[in-house]
Image: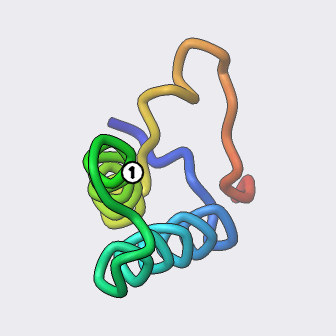
Amino acid sequence: MKANMGKADRLIRIIIALLIGYLYYTGVLSGTVAIILGILAIIFIATSFISFCPLYLPFGLSTRKKS
């Protein structure tokens, strides 16, 4: 696994995941939508920590700066 996510991409994903968590905690999200968005939030957190997005791979995308 080669890192393909830049700092901005990782930060945006973490912010979105935290927002989903907050909306669930306050009761704005419930039911099936809460479950689906909760799974998405977990995926966002996981991919942010490992700096790798599997969906970028088939398309050859990378938001990481070239060094």
**Residue 46: percent from the left, percent from the top?**
28, 57
* Quadrant of the image occupied by residue 4: top right
* Quadrant of the image occupied by residue 45: bottom left
Identify residue for label 1.
Answer: 37
In the displayed structure image, the side of residue 17 where residue 10 appears, left or right? right
- Name the residue located 73 percent from the left edge and 53 percent from the top edge: 66
- Name the residue located 58 percent from the left edge and 75 percent from the top edge: 11
In the displayed structure image, the side of residue 25 where residue 65 appears, left or right? right
59 or 19: nearer the eye? 19
- Name the residue located 66 percent from the left edge and 21 percent from the top edge: 60
Q: Is residue 15 above or below residue 42?
A: below
Pick the quarter of the image with the N terminus.
top left
Q: Amino acid at mark 1?
A: Leu
29 or 57: nearer the eye? 29
Q: Is residue 37 above or below residue 48?
A: above
**Residue 8: percent from the left, percent from the top?**
69, 71
- Label 1 Cα neighbours within 10 Å, binned few <14 / some 14-19 / many ≥20: some
* Quadrant of the image occupied by residue 51: bottom left
- Name the residue located 32 percent from the left edge and 49 percent from the top edge: 43
Task: Give the colour scheme of this rendering.
Answer: rainbow
Q: Residue furthest top?
A: 58
62 or 25: nearer the eye? 25
Pick the quarter of the image with the C terminus.
bottom right
**Residue 30: percent from the left, percent from the top?**
32, 59
Tag 1 secondary structure:
helix
The mark total stands at: 1
